[in-house]
Amino acid sequence: MTQPAAEPLSNPDAMEVAPGTEHEMLEGWIPPMATEEETREALEQAFDYRGDVTITLKTGVRIEGYIFDRRPAPALHRSIVRIMPKDTSERVSIPYSEIAGLAFTGRDSAAGKSWEAWVQRYWEKKAAGEKNIGIQAEALD
């Protein structure tokens, strides 16, 4: 009689090679925002980005900061993005319809700090003979 295969969740080796989420490198990117769909997609990516962005309003005003919330609605003028400007504790709400441009200007503070990167470093340390290798959070900066 053969033994049943180990469940993936009970097999640590299988868990360590589980596929993760692939993140795009957006730092420095200036997305096209010519259509409503492009505007919505760019602002969704900006919300998921872990660094600062620069929003240029149709009035020419530029706001650099971290997007911490967005509230999409069926109409662009009712959809808003909320940003914490870089040099103030103020929180600003901006309707999507007032945005002329977006640039991913800040450093992505979590780039290279994915689970896959940690697992790779773990196996490199283990192959080098290091002992007591554990999961410790790395500093973001």
Image: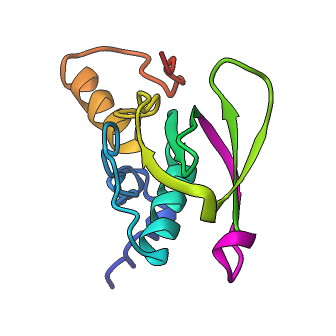
Describe residue 67's horizontal placement relative to residue 38 as left or right.
right
The color scheme shown is rainbow
Is 27 drawn above or below residue 81 in the view shown? above
User: For the view shown, which residue lies furthest in the front direction?
Assistant: 59
In the image, 21 versus 136, the foreground residue is: 21
In the image, 27 versus 87, the foreground residue is: 87
Is 137 drawn above or below residue 44 in the view shown? above
Q: Quadrant of the N terminus?
A: bottom left
Q: Would residue 50 be seen by someone viewing this image from the given angle?
A: no
77 part of magenta stretch:
yes
Which residue is rendered at x = 52% and y = 69% of the image?
40
Residue 79 percent location from the top left of the image? 70, 68
In the image, 134 versus 46, the foreground residue is: 46
Residue 2 percent location from the top left of the image? 32, 81
Which residue is rendered at x = 50% and y = 28% of the image?
135
Which residue is rendered at x = 45% and y = 60% of the image?
42
Residue 116 percent location from the top left of the image? 34, 44
Please report the bounds of the magenta region as a residue range: 65-78
Describe residue 124's horizontal placement relative to residue 111 as left or right.
left
Residue 52 percent location from the top left of the image? 52, 33
Is 31 drawn above or below residue 38 in the view shown? above
In the image, 3 versus 59, the foreground residue is: 59
